[in-house]
Amino acid sequence: MNPNKKECKCPLCGRLAQALELKPGQRIECKEKCTTYEISEGLKQLLASGTPEDKGFAPYLSDAAQRATHGAGPNILSFCLQLNEKNYPEIAADEKGFQDLVQPVVKYLKSKGIVVKGEGEHSFVYLELLLPNADHTTTLKVERSLFMDRTPKELESYCRDFNIAGELAKTPRGGSLEIDKSAAIRQTPKG
């Protein structure tokens, strides 16, 4: 263990973490859920003793921190969120909006017994999935604009009509299933 780090409780998810003191806050390494993020002392106190509304932001901030660094290699610090008492409502609102967008697809996948292990987004939304009776994960990549152009019911219908679960089952170990703007489905081997 790094002597400059101390064990602490993660301010976002409450799990065991390590903190590195920074000026004016801390860098938290939460290996169980949130990964790595930086948090100001003011926000840390607000989440610990603030109103129920303030405390309600913590799960969204936790998910946002996890998504920000999902898949980041050794340069994880360039991706980690820097949370403070000024930016946290916007980051939490963005995360809630993202979760609302992908909810129809996640709901469909869960109904088929598929476990959603992680989510990420850039121009594509990435869902890391564990398929039933599989010992490996598969990635579903959906172009972000598809979520913007369709209602939740249309997304659920699309998943059913095109049997996304069945297509995922055909995806090779370490591969991915990609759905682009044209709504075309392509399987990609591990690359």
Image (cartoon, rainbow, N blue to C red):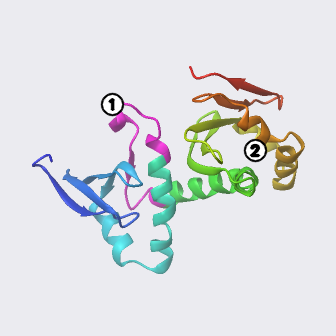
Q: Which residue is located at x 51 percent, y 76 percent?
A: 53
Where is residue 61 drawn, in percent x and y? 47, 58
* Residue 24 visible in this rendered orientation of the protein: no
Q: Which residue is located at x 75 percent, y 57 percent?
A: 111
Residue numbers of the magenta segment: 67-88
Dot placed on the residue nearer the N-terminal end, 1 or 2: 1
- The circle on residue 85 is none
Left or right of residue 128: residue 160 = right
Q: CA distance from mark 1 to mark 2?
A: 31 Å
Residue under pointer 1: 74
Residue under pointer 2: 147
Q: Which residue is located at x 83 percent, y 28 percent?
A: 182
Q: Identify which amino acid the numbered label 2 is placed on.
A: Phe
Q: Is residue 100 above or below residue 123?
A: below
> Which quadrant holds the C terminus?
top right
Location of residue 170 (image quadrant): top right
Q: Is residue 98 above or below residue 127?
A: below
Q: Secondary structure at mark 2?
A: helix
Instruction: Examine the structure image and report whether residue 177 is included in the region drawn in magenta.
Output: no
Where is residue 183 drawn, in percent x and y? 83, 32
Where is residue 121 drawn, in percent x and y? 59, 40
* Residue 69 visible in this rendered orientation of the protein: yes
Left or right of residue 29: residue 179 = right
Q: Is residue 125 above or below residue 114?
A: above
Q: Nearer the viewer, mark 1 or mark 2?
A: 1
Location of residue 172 (image quadrant): top right
Q: Identify which amino acid the numbered label 1 is placed on.
A: Pro
